[in-house]
Image: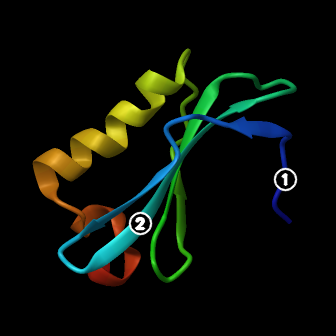
Amino acid sequence: MEEEYPNEDSRHCQEFTLDGHTIDVRTYRGIEPPTGCFREVVDESGTSTIWDDQLASDDKAMAEPNSTLEQEGIGPLVDTLNK
């Protein structure tokens, strides 16, 4: 069973489309503990990747997905391309 934590979306939530694949990149902050910023990528098949670490700001939380997109392309963030 997955645990749900109350959270609020960041202003950075957005979709990216590269090489014919679309991902939804979300950053959000917990409203109740834990209250750090989290990041999540949902690919076109609905597979969700959530980073374990919490960061102090949504800007920092968005840096990792952006860095991956810039350095490695969309492939590492799309589950169907990694099978």
**In front here: 13 or 68?**
13
Which residue ends up furthest to the left in the rendered image? Answer: 71
| Amino acid type, callout 1 | Glu
Residue 72 placement (x, y as % from top left): 14, 55
How many residues crowd around disc 2 within 10 Å: few (fewer than 14), some, or many (20 or more)?
many
Q: Position of residue 24 (x, y in %)?
A: 48, 61
Amino acid type, mark 2: Ile
Residue at the spot 52% in from the left edge and 46% down from the top edge: 13
Q: Is residue 55 left or right of residue 71?
A: right
Dot 1 alpha-carbon crowd within 10 angstroms: few under 14, some 14 to 19, many 20 or more: few
The foreground one among 30 and 9 is 9
Measured as percent of width and height from the top left, residue 6 is found at 86, 40
The image quadrant of residue 9 is top right
Dot placed on the residue nearer the N-terminal end, 1 or 2: 1
Q: Secondary structure at mark 2?
A: strand
Q: Quadrant of the C terminus?
A: bottom left
Residue 18: image location, x then y, percent: 22, 68
Disc 2 target residue: 23
In the orientation shown, which residue stands out farthest toward the top?
A: 56
Query: Residue at 56% of width from left, 77% of height from top?
Result: 46
State the scheme by which the image is colored: rainbow
Q: Where is mark 1, residue-wise?
A: 3
Residue under the image location 51 percent in, 44 percent down:
51
Q: How many marks?
A: 2
Whether residue 25 sits left or right of residue 16 in the image: it is: right
Residue drawn at point x = 77 percent, y = 26 percent: 34
The Cα–Cα distance between marks 1 and 2, rounded to whole angstroms, is 23 Å
> Helix, strand or loop at disc 1?
loop
